[in-house]
Amino acid sequence: DGGITQSPKYLFRKEGQNVTLSCEQNLNHDAMYWYRQDPGQGLRLIYYSQIVNDFQKGDIAEGYSVSREKKESFPLTVTSAQKNPTAFYLCASSLSGTGDHEQYFGPGTRLTVT
Amino acid sequence: GDSVTQMEGPVTLSEEAFLTINCTYTATGYPSLFWYVQYPGEGLQLLLKATKADDKGSNKGFEATYRKETTSFHLEKGSVQVSDSAVYFCALTSSGSARQLTFGSGTQLTVLP
């Protein structure tokens, strides 16, 4: 089955530690995205990538980093510089970053930092 | 910049009731409009979309019409079911080269049997 996988579903970390969230897709999509969701709020874009080896900051990129070395993978690192890292993180992909292509979402990773 | 405003929840309805969730937007150019649904503990799924004025998106009994004159994209369903209980997000894509989604804050719907 084609789709997007995110692992793990739940992640716990101590304050001051970096943590990397995994996102893999086998849909052969060019574009991938990372969103953050906080309770009672919509999704906010962290980073996006329209093609391998290229990515752009979204609205709330501070304290996060990404890489796009392979078409199917777009890992997100939450660094210790992120002031409020506890949130639900969603990865998405689309056929292309241009045009009206649907974004497909993964099941999400809930990160708790204490 | 672009923005989406949707009615605050939570919304609680009885089974077979009529549903309306209001959504209005601010955008430059000609955005495409979407409704996404999120079931508990899951990611988002596209429910329906409309790409130009007066288009009607529909899926699973849900409908929404792209109204450019009122900058609205209200979600409606004639008879809700318990299984429709979820969070609904209105969203738009900008008309720039990178079509990022801008989301509303979401509306929690609970349908009681």
Image: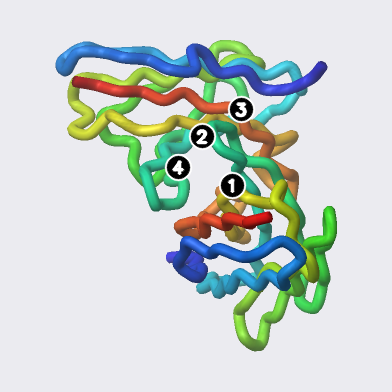
> In the visual, does B20 lie left or right of A66?
right
Q: Are discs 3 and 1 both within one chain?
A: no
Q: To which chain does the residue with label 4 belong?
A: A
Q: Are marks 4 and 3 in contact (CB under 8 Å)?
A: no
The quadrant of the picture occupied by the N terminus of chain B is bottom left
Residue depicted at 29% across the width and 30% down the height: A86
Please say if B97 is above or below A62. below
Residues behind callouts 2 and 1 on a single chain: no
Q: How many marks?
A: 4
- Give the amino acid at mark 2: Tyr
Q: Which residue is mark 3?
A: A106
Q: Is residue B51 visible?
A: no
Which amino acid, mark 3? Gly
Residue A45: mark in rendering:
4
Whole-number angstrom distance, CA of label 2 to CA of label 1: 9 Å
Q: Which amino acid type corresponds to the residue marked 1 in the rendered image?
A: Ala
